[in-house]
Image (spheres, rainbow, N blue to C red):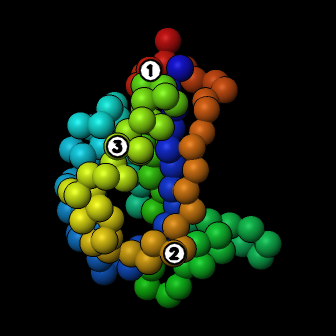
């Protein structure tokens, strides 16, 4: 069963092109370490909430857009080995230093799918 990494971040809206360039540079590194798919999502209809919301979660400021990202791995073991290897990969470390957003407000986690259907990578 595939395993997913996901993150949510607030990206300066004016840096959308820089973010996309960063993703395009980052993806080959992830793929070289075993990732099978990536999906980057630029917020388009992300309402503010009073108690909870994506904008509140990342402390989104004026002039920022919420981004949600998913990386698909063939399994959790591949993902864990990849992240361990990438900790020592100079290219990866350089890429992480040049993120076009405030990484301190990034929310990150790994997820085990409990239901999949359709053409999602790895679904049966």
Contact check, label 3 and label 2, Cβ < 8 Å: no
Q: Residue furthest top?
A: 124
Identity of the residue drawn at 24% across and 46% down: 29
Residue at x-position 60% and y-position 39%: 111
Residue at mark 3 to residue at mark 2: CA–CA distance: 22 Å
Residue at horizontal 49 percent and vertical 18 percent from the top: 123
What percent of the width, then of the height, locates residue 8?
Answer: 52, 61
- Closer to the observer: label 3 or label 2? 3
Q: Earlier in the sequence, mark 3 or mark 1?
A: 3
Q: Residues within 10 Å of mark 3 (few under 14, many from 20)?
A: few
Question: Contact, CB < 8 Å: mark 3 with mark 1?
Answer: no
**Percent from the top left, x then y, of residue 45?**
53, 63
Q: Nearer the viewer, mark 2 or mark 1?
A: 2
Residue under numbered circle 3: 85
**Residue 38 in view:** no
Horizontal side, residue 82 vs residue 50: left or right:
left
Indicate which label's residue lies in the foreground, 3 or 1.
3
Q: In this rendering, is residue 41 above or below 82?
A: below
Most foreground residue, 4 or 68: 4
| Circle 2/circle 1 CB separation < 8 Å | no
Q: Which residue is mark 2?
A: 104
Q: Is residue 70 above or below residue 61?
A: above
Q: Which residue is mark 1?
A: 122
């Amino acid at each position: 069963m595939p395993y997913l990494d996901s993150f949510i971040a607030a990206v300066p809206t004016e840096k959308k092109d820089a973010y996309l360039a960063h993703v395009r540079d980052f993806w080959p590194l992830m793929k070289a370490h075993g990732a099978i798919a990536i999906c980057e999502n630029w917020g388009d209809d992300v309402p503010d909430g009073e108690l909870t919301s994506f904008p509140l979660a990342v402390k989104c400021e004026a002039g920022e857009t919420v981004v949600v990202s998913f990386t698909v791995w063939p399994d959790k073991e591949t993902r864990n080995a990849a992240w361990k290897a990438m900790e020592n990969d100079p290219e990866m470390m350089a890429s992480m230093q040049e993120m076009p957003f405030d990484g301190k407000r990034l929310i990150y986690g790994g997820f085990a799918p409990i239901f999949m259907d359709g053409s999602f990578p790895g679904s049966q």
